[in-house]
Amino acid sequence: MTLWGGRFKEGTAAKLSQFKDSIGFDQRMYAEDIAGSIVYARALVRAKVLQAEEAETIIRGLEAVRKEFAARQFEFRETDEDIHTAVERRLIEIVGAVGGKLHAGRSRNEQVATDLRLWLLHRLPKLDEALKRLQVALIQRASEHTETAMPGYTHLQPAQPISVAHWLLSYCWMLMRDRDRLRDARRRMALCPLGSGAIAGTPFPLDRQAMARELGFTAPTQNSLDAVSDRDFVAETAFALALIGTHLSRFAEDIVIFSNPGFGFICLPDRYSTGSSLMPQKRNADVFELTRGKAGRLLGNLVALMSMMKALPSGYNADLQEDKEAIFDSMDALAAMIPLLADVVVALEIDEKALRAALDEELLATDLSEYLVRKGVPFRTAHEWVGKLVAMAEETGTSLSALPLDRMQAVSQRFEKDVYRVFDMDHSLASRDILGGTAPQSVRGQIETARDCLERLDEIGGMG
Ligand code: ARG
């Protein structure tokens, strides 16, 4: 029997049950659902709806149900539509009719809104911790390579030399903002809907402050209609997760490119590489390709949630049930991916020889213009002159530094003997010693700041 069968003359069609039941996926929230029920039972006592002994019986029953779930011994019935009905059904089986008193003034609408908020509040800190570990790995690797130059790219064309540390840290900063976003989402999420009823609020004088506090929320929600029907906390989290996926997909793409033999900057150790069933020589970076691919899935979940919510009429609608699979999937994808990425970052082999070989002197064309600017030449003119030298070098098939001084001076007399000092990658890196620049000294400062920010994120907490 369902928990709402009174007004119906026949049972639910099997196909409808299969179509609408959410127990298959919302049972993941059993602990949150039971915690909410225990708190609700206590509030009913204070509101004089339940006797203290009745509540004790109910709470004992709920603890027993929790144990069954924890031990994977909970036996589902066909009529268990969702986690809320399953828990209540089993409670009544265990404690008898008194269990039927728990749902007084309560609706599954507020239960599901409460459960999902709690579920995310409980799990986001673990994800945050994993992201931190990845950041620590990036910083660790960066600290080994503050002086290692590599080509920096714009439009994926060689642009200017940067340090490997600078490249790695760029991702650390993206993740810093992502973690801050998770805190932000979590702060807005931490409000308790219990007491909202189906849409209108509960007629019993429940202490909503106490229920919120006991469940670890910061406060109760302010509008029952809003509380049961909005899923902005889910969408916001899905966005934060999709953006994490997007950031990681960019990192992954860099590694796919850099580990290609055409670049050869990075080698994945065997244990993180995959082979081809056909081509014996292949060494694939599946871990990064999948990271790239998962970003699409994370974005898809966000789009699914937003489209599900769009134009829903006021109040609870069954459409909202679609929220859980999407957000669970995003959480699962990142929970599997981020700890692995942290391990892989620690193990990445950086081939300094390949990097040196890739540092073509053309990467210093901008430095060459800046050499002229220091001598008072307007930058636009300098750009033009250096462009001529680049063309000259390309035509003769030599490097820039192999151009004799008299050929340079045929372009401009402002090129002097000291011009050859420009052709030094380390010098180029060191010259960009501005805050946020790639000079080893700046990057060491950047590492300090990143470490401070990690500590500050720990302090802001909100993720405990
Ligand atoms: N399984 C439902 C969900 O996930 C719980 C709320 C059901 N409420 C209702 N009135 N049908 O949204």
Image: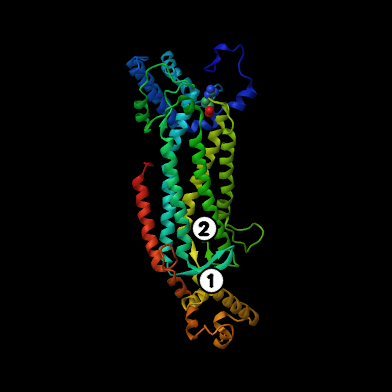
Say which residue appears at 37% left-offset and 48% top-offset: 457
Q: Is residue 407 above or below residue 67?
A: below
| Residue sitting nearer the eye, 99 or 199 | 199
Expressed as whole percent of the image width and height from the top left, the position of residue 225 reads 49, 25
> Tag on residue 140?
none
Few, some or many residues within 10 Å of mark 1 (<14, 14–19, 20+): some
Few, some or many residues within 10 Å of mark 2 (<14, 14–19, 20+): few
- Mark 2 or 1: in front is 1
As helix, strand or loop, the secondary structure at mark 2 comes to: helix
Q: Amino acid at mark 1?
A: Ala
Instruction: State the separation of the CA atoms marked 2 and 1.
Output: 22 Å
Expressed as whole percent of the image width and height from the top left, the position of residue 47 reads 35, 17
Tell whether 181 sits left or right of 250. left
The residue labelled by disc 2 is 271
Q: Is residue 287 above or below residue 416?
A: above
Q: Is residue 362 above or below residue 444?
A: below
Expressed as whole percent of the image width and height from the top left, the position of residue 16 reads 63, 23
The residue labelled by disc 1 is 354
Q: Amino acid at mark 2?
A: Arg
As helix, strand or loop, the secondary structure at mark 1 comes to: helix
The image quadrant where one finds the C terminus is top left
Expressed as whole percent of the image width and height from the top left, the position of residue 130 reads 43, 48
| Residue sitting nearer the eye, 248 or 173 | 173
Res 80 seen here:
no
Q: Is residue 274 above or below residue 392?
A: above
